[in-house]
Amino acid sequence: MDADLRKCAQEALDNGPDEDEQSESGCNWIGGILLAWTSPPVVRDVKASVQKNFRRPISPGDVLHSVSGQEVENMSRADILRALTRFDGGLGFRAKQAANISLADLLRCNSTAMEPVAPQRGERRRPPGGVAEQALPDEGFNSFGWLSPIYLPPDRDIRGNLHGGDVYVHGNDIKEPRLGSIYTFTLYSDRQGFGAQECEPRSVTRFAVPMKSMSSIRLPPEEARPARNYLRQSLFYPALEEQGITLRRYLWGDPSGSSLHIFELWGHPEAIITVADQLNLLQMEVLTRHRMCRPNADGRGSQAANRVCGAQKNVYCDGIFDLCHIGHQNLFRNASKLGTHVWVGVVGDKDANSYKRPPIMTAAEREAQVLGCKHVDRVIPNALCFGMTEEFLKEHDIHVCAVGQEYFDRYPNPDDDPYYKVPRKMGIAVPLPRFEGLSTSDLIRRIRERASPDWTVSSLPSPTGDALGTRASDDYHRKECLSEPRKNVYCDGIFDMCHIGHQNLFRNASKLGTHVFVGVVGDKDANSYKRPPIMTAAEREAQVLGCKDVDRVIPNALCFGMTEEFLKEHDIHVCAVGQEYFDRYPNPDDDPYYKVPRKMGIAVPLPRFEGLSTSELIQRVQDRFPPDEPAK
């Protein structure tokens, strides 16, 4: 990157700035980063290929403040470019300042979305005479949390004293969670799992108060801790509830090292402004670039929190998404660049059966797995397979349709397109390139070929990082959040044909700490463990990294005999281990896999997912396509 950056800087110095739509100062591409020559320089765009060189992902709006350790915010364009021509490592960026954003603008997106949400239960009903269960066991406060819809029963009871702020409820109860909001609700259970009713979204705003300014904050005298079971480091102030505001104070401070107190207000935007003024918080910094909730509600809630200041732009893409793989994840990532929210339509079983071939997975399984992928904010079940209509687009408030380039190539005239005629004629269809790597057909073919006794994963092609669309070994993005002291949770496995069981593991592991590191066993060890994997190590790493809750992938993870050196090298504080290892080896000394973390006291057992497995998926394919039958 260094040589490319120096070359770009010299060319920009020689040729002058390009036009910039947002300012008269112009802009230039410098080593994969589009810099606008405002004062200070601001990032307009950034190529994904350069993100790996930075500890924190760079975003449009970030400010360039140093080059090779030299501050540049008050330097001219020419001086900055001269410094870049001598670049020898170290570009410093800081997040876009929130001071230029008014509190009213900050809350604008939620200001029209504060009416209570009627539960949409479809055919679900509370048991006759049943009593709704409260998500929190404490009296005097409503239940609250970030609602995350799921379409399969959870693998265990997810009650208030187990969740970390996220509440997983059946998707039929609340089909359209208002992202970036916290909810008050009543939780109940039935045979389909947990559901929520009487849901009311509340806007959320955080303020950072320096230690020296705490004396100017006018806090109510009464403090309470109603959520001791899972919000152990939070205080609440009951007196403000009468004004429709919940005030939460975090007790852990700012992990970056500065002495800050963090306050969070939930409620209607107007009420937040009124109470913040009463408390003298309006004079403090408003935090806009943090994650409101954990990355699983990451893939959902984190995106919403980072987008709260802009107008909502819903991007839609659809498909069958059978054996959901890295090609599909690449589609979701590309779609996310076209707007603020990604809504994915999953075609139901009936239409999918008549399209190409009957899917290997059921519609419910496909919906759940798509929802477990990063960048996906919402899943629309039973999506249209043929003939998208204007009514469908309006019903789901879709602003952009991400469509495969092959439909534009196959049907140059939109009137001939049986799938996307309407959005193309409306001018809202945007073509996306087809992923040329892995496909569902490839996976099916590999499964059929592996029936040969001579088949090994080494016979498969080794895709490059570019073909996969990600560099799994070093595409670790630090969370842009204020959080409790860092606690890295580790889990590992082969993760062949990564499925909802694996996604469930990552979600459960995320509840044990602040970051989830996933070790992916390499091809050599995987071949000798159980069976040769269907996917290469590079493909498995990329797919795991594309799942919500996963912060970092560690390639070539140890398959046998985890060591203390490995745990120290990767700064691992907790090992999430399947309960079956504790059952199979009651004495830790007998455990050939997790002996060390168990004896260190950092191994935590997690229940095994009893639903879908890789073995079952392979068996389904083999049953569907006998060896003597040609594959479709």
Image (tube, rainbow, N blue to C red):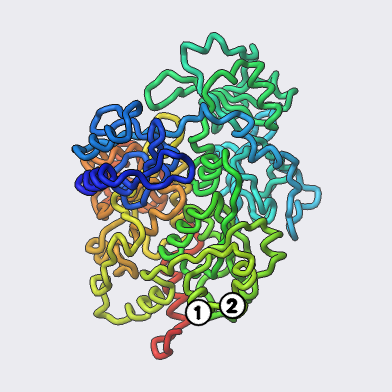
Q: What kind of residue is marked 1?
A: Arg
Residue sticking out furthest to the top: 215
Q: Which residue is mark 1?
A: 410
Residue 437, picture quadrant: bottom left
Q: How far from the left and from the top, in percent, is residue 533?
A: 32, 68
- For the residues labelled 1 and 2, say whether their Cβ atoms are less than 8 Å apart: yes
The answer to which of 30 and 195 lies nearer the viewer is 30
**Is the residue marked by circle 1 packed among few (<14), some (14-19), or many (20+) residues within 10 Å?**
few
In this rendering, would 84 be left or right of 583?
A: left
How far is disc 1 from disc 2 in space, using C-alphas?
Answer: 8 Å
Residue 85, picture quadrant: top left
| Residue in the image at 42% along x and 18% along y | 259
| Residue in the image at 46% along x and 14% along y | 211
The answer to which of 477 and 71 lies nearer the viewer is 71
Q: Quadrant of the C terminus?
A: bottom left
Q: How far from the left and from the top, in percent, is residue 436?
A: 37, 70
Q: Which residue is mark 2?
A: 417
Asked which secondary structure carries label 1, the reply is helix
Residue sticking out furthest to the right: 129
**Is there any visible trace of residue 589 in the rendered image?**
no
Asked which secondary structure carries label 2, the reply is loop
| Residue in the image at 46% along x and 62% along y | 331
The answer to which of 173 and 155 lies nearer the viewer is 173
**Is there any visible trace of residue 178 in the rendered image?**
yes
Q: How far from the left and from the top, in percent, is residue 498?
A: 41, 61
Vertical side of 209 occupied by 141: above or below: below
**Is the residue marked by circle 2 packed among few (<14), some (14-19), or many (20+) residues within 10 Å?**
some
